[in-house]
Amino acid sequence: MKQPLLALTLGVASVTTAFGQGQTLSGQVLDSAGKPVIGATVVEKGTNNGTATDNAGRFTLKTRTASPRLQISSIGYGSQEVAATGGEVSVRLSDSSTSLGDVQVVGSRSQNRSVTDSPSPVDIIDLREVTTKTGQLDVNQLLQFVAPSFNSNRQTGSDGADHVDPASLRGLGPDQTLVLVNGKRQHQSALVNLFGSRGRGNTGTDLNVIPAASIERIEILRDGAAAQYGSDAIAGVINIVLKSSVNELTASANYGAYDAQYRRDDQQFDGGNLNANVNYGLGLGERGSFVNATLDFNQRQHTQRANVPAPDGLARREYGDPKVQNLSAYLNSKFALSERSHIYVFGGANKRTGDAYAWTRFADDDRNVPAIYPNGFDPIITSDIWDASAVVGLRTKLGEWDLDLSNNFGSNRFEYGVKNSLNASLGAASPTSFNAGGFQLQQDVVGLGLTRNYKTVLNGLNLAAGAEFRREWYSLFAGEEASYRNYDPSKSGGSQGFPGYQPSDAIKADRDNVGAYVDAELSVTPQWLLAAALRYEHYTDFGSTLNYKASTRYNLTEFLTLRGTYSTGFRAPSLAQINFNSTFTNFIGGSPVEVLLARNNSAVTQKLGVPALKQETSNSANLGLTSRIGSSLSLTVDGYYIKVKDRVVLTSQFSADDPVIGPDLTALNVDQAQFFANAVDTRSLGLDVVLNHTARLGEGRLNSSVAANINHLKIDRVQTTGRLAGREDDFFGPREQAFVKASAPPSKINLTFDYQVGRFSTLLRFVRFDKVRLVDFDGNDMNYAARVTTDLTLSYALTDHLQFSVGSTNLFNRYPTFFNPINTETGGAWDPVQMGSNGRFYFAKLQARF
């Protein structure tokens, strides 16, 4: 064994030292006006070797191939590929407006507006860099540790939310952030979150259906944008830009696992996470046509963190992340028809299956059948999720106007199953697995957009106008009879862990929406930009809304810019929030209760006088400055204010002994009931700060950054209605209010050091999560203390085409504050807050680029 191992070691050493040293290239990247392009990406084609330009637009790169070709790109400009034959390399990038079809930066419909020109704060996250140097493998977790204003935690014991991670921007709800793919609206998940410490009562978009390997960059617009893009953009917009690279194959294999702690056995590692993906782009002809395809597989195993101090006993014997298997295929393509027209097609499909542990039924529980489970049982909630989307469109020139006509279809189907369970009312004859039903959401959007740039109007005027028609369908379907029926009234009926949906829950609903917008940006002077947008929308289920946005940007000096926006916004209640209905088992203080979640127009809500759901409305303002100090330091500071009226929330639960609703609940044979209502007004004040610095350090280059989000959310009003007027604490009590406020920590600060020298690079990141306050089932405060996590990645280019990385996230094994499992929302020692409750994660990656 020793001889083969020695041979392999010597072989690798000889390979890594035998490569040609290449040549050291230097150059400058300029725009069409001859000004430096700062932060342009310079990559040696077919390798993992690259760099970025400094504030003078200059770069230095030691090449690894004999005849290197450089791929140079920057957001807001057309990309170029040049042969580097030695000496000084000088490149001029054209404005993207001169190349029909380039994707503009989110937040502006001007195709020649760069990030630094935008009057709104926009983060640009290069996925190639992030996926190379971090241990997170899915999009939600990547953003959680890269973008401070973004927050997402894996849930446990939260039914469907265990399988679809809820995420939020600037501390608002998951459904108050709009997600676009290549600038087109992405459909939401069919799931409405009912439990967990984040996104309760919200729907949202499942970002993890899109594999990170298919993404070129992610643009995060941290500003209200409903007047530009429509419903859901109250907190901001996340635009996912798919890869368009050609004649390049990239592939990676990644594996990681957690340092197991608080298990009931002596297993050293758990939560094994395997990811493998491949991406390839094929160029077609001379007019920029291409097809870029990605295939991605991810498999994640359970973690187990149930063996914790429990003064009142354990609520769960199995507590931790679910087991999930994810397979995705995505495509991005463009087909030129002429010099002035092309067709684009993109989209993909995702298949996900999952197993998540529900709360334990102990041996002496009256919902257990000892003949089947002598020691009790731990039900497993399974998921079978299909997600698909397809966009086809035409971009062409109509005189001086750019026209974009598209159709966008998306579908998300979520089917529940339950295994390792039983229906106690069937006794020893009960099956142990069940089909529990589920739901589906579909969306079809037809859009028409026109843009034109008038270069001779003052210093440039960009006009845009368009219209959209959107149809949405929602269905909820029942499970098999044994999953919901009670065959013996003296015992608990339905599948334990997750009762199936009943035929009375089933529904099919749809609605239409039409919208129209106008958008203008005027460069009054080279220093001063004014912009405005107006949007009208009409929904068939609640009526019309009109929203506007005004913004400005002024360059005080060459190095200092002021910017500001003010906007109104709205979010239409989702079809799931309007139509969802279910009877399920909840746990309060570790004890089970049967709960009716009544749909908005049900007999219960009508008796209570709860009105039909209407749109949420918002007013938001952003004031900031951007600065470049010297040639290597940049700073952005943005303060924001967001006021949301009539937020849709899931109310507190009303018990059968309530003097108002009690008789109705008794007649329905349920212990508690809750429903959706426009019940809450909130107000958010916050600050985003991003500081970047680049410096030469020895023979290498050190990039340093500090990014912070400080956010304070206040509930201004709880509005009760009908027969529950004046009972604010019963309608939406302190516990539910605490969950809303805890959508994000009051602050999150990210400090990153990224050093590269030759073939070696290292990334060191510190993330500070501020304290979080929740309320337990007994009404006591749960104060999670602030925590700091440390991530470390070491990378080495084994060859010109292979890079190997090893590292750890949460290197020092930090956990949130412990609490009594009987009194938490999840039945474990922690609710899903801050960095999560899995501890230290080790990973290794092998990445290839040809």
Image: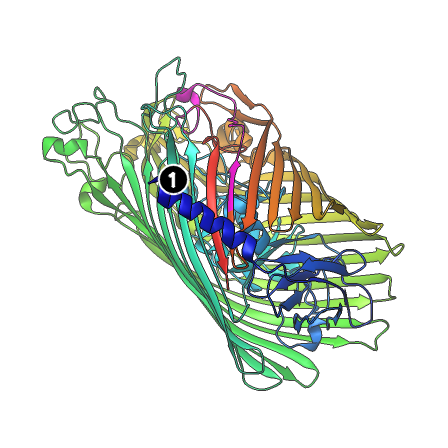
Measured as percent of width and height from the top left, residue 140 is found at 51, 46
Query: Is 170 situated left or right of 406 in this image?
Result: right
Q: Is residue 819 magenta?
A: yes
Q: Is residue 38 magenta?
A: no
Q: Main secondary structure of the magenta part?
A: loop
Does residue 428 show up?
Answer: yes
Measured as percent of width and height from the top left, residue 525 is found at 88, 66
Query: Residue lying furthest front in this view?
Result: 3
Displayed quadrant of residue 485: top left
Q: Nearer the viewer, residue 140 or 177?
A: 140
Query: Is 117 situated left or right of 741 in this image?
Result: right
Helix, strand or loop at label 1? It is strand
Query: Is 590 situated left or right of 839 in this image?
Result: left
* Vertical comparison of 743 with 203: above or below: above
Query: Is 528 situated left or right of 790 in this image?
Result: right
Q: Nearer the viewer, residue 697 or 684?
A: 697
Q: Residue at x 81, y 62 (%)?
A: 529
What residue sits right under mark 1 in the picture?
Answer: 272
